[in-house]
Amino acid sequence: MEDHTYVLDYLPDGRPDERKYKHETLVLALGEDEFKLFELIPQDGISILVGDRVYIGKDVDKREHIKHVKRRISWKELTHAAQSEVPYVIEEIIDRDPSKFIRFYNEAHPLTKRYHMLELLPGLGRKKMEAIIEERRKGEFKDFEDLMERVPLLHKPKKLVKERIMEELKNPSIKYKIWVAE
């Protein structure tokens, strides 16, 4: 269950394809923990901006901005504006709790005899994977800077995480998911 989401788009008159009598203010949002995509109904008279972090958890008394979660949506149901915001929001989520993502580099394991979780990251091949595994045997990575310093072959590890999350959001039928919940 997601407790917080980030606003990707605010639709004061609802979706443009809805019938006139069905106009309903909507917020399109991305979950902070499981990267679920949502259509939310905001509280009346509340000002919400793209990029805002809003609470949608079970404690209704804490919900200042959101009345309720209308439904989960897919990538294709996002507006183009919302889709263009997703990479920036993912970066913000990674920066908010980098330890969650560095943990992946520290704990990734083989999926099969020939395929490792690290290889799920776009642009990370066998050579970089082996360098990461060799370095983490010496001790866990503390942060992204430590990872880049100890594994010089690896450039922009945060970007690799972001690109993988984007892949998982865009392709719901992807076989192995690391971050996006079903």
Image (spheres, helix red, strand yellow):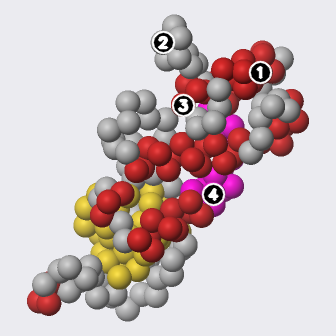
Say which of marks 4 and 1 sits in front. Answer: 1
Mark 2 is surrounded, within 10 Å at the Cα level, by few (under 14), some (14 to 19) or many (20 or more) other residues, namely few
Q: Is residue 44 above or below residue 6?
A: below
For mark 2, what is the residue?
112
Residue ID at (30%, 64%): 77
Q: Where residue 141 sits in the image (x, y, percent)?
A: 78, 31
Count the marks.
4
For mark 3, what is the residue?
120
Query: Which label's residue is closer to the chain start, 1 or 2?
Result: 2
Between 92 and 78, which is closer to the camera in this rendering? 78
For mark 4, what is the residue?
91
Whether pointer 4 and pointer 3 mark residues with C-beta atoms closer than 8 Å, the reply is no
Give the alpha-carbon distance from disc 3 to disc 2, as whole Å. 12 Å
Query: Which label's residue is closer to the chain start, 4 or 3?
Result: 4
Q: Residue furthest right?
A: 149
Q: Is residue 79 visible?
A: yes
Query: Which label's residue is closer to the chain start, 4 or 2?
Result: 4
Residue ID at (25%, 67%): 70
Predominant secondary structure, magenta span: helix
Q: Is residue 43 visible?
A: no
* Residue 129, image quadrant: top right
Say which of marks 4 and 2 sits in front. Answer: 2
For mark 1, what is the residue?
131
In terms of secondary structure, where does tag 4 sit? helix
Query: Which label's residue is closer to the chain start, 4 or 1?
Result: 4
What residue span does the magenta drawing correspond to?
90-104
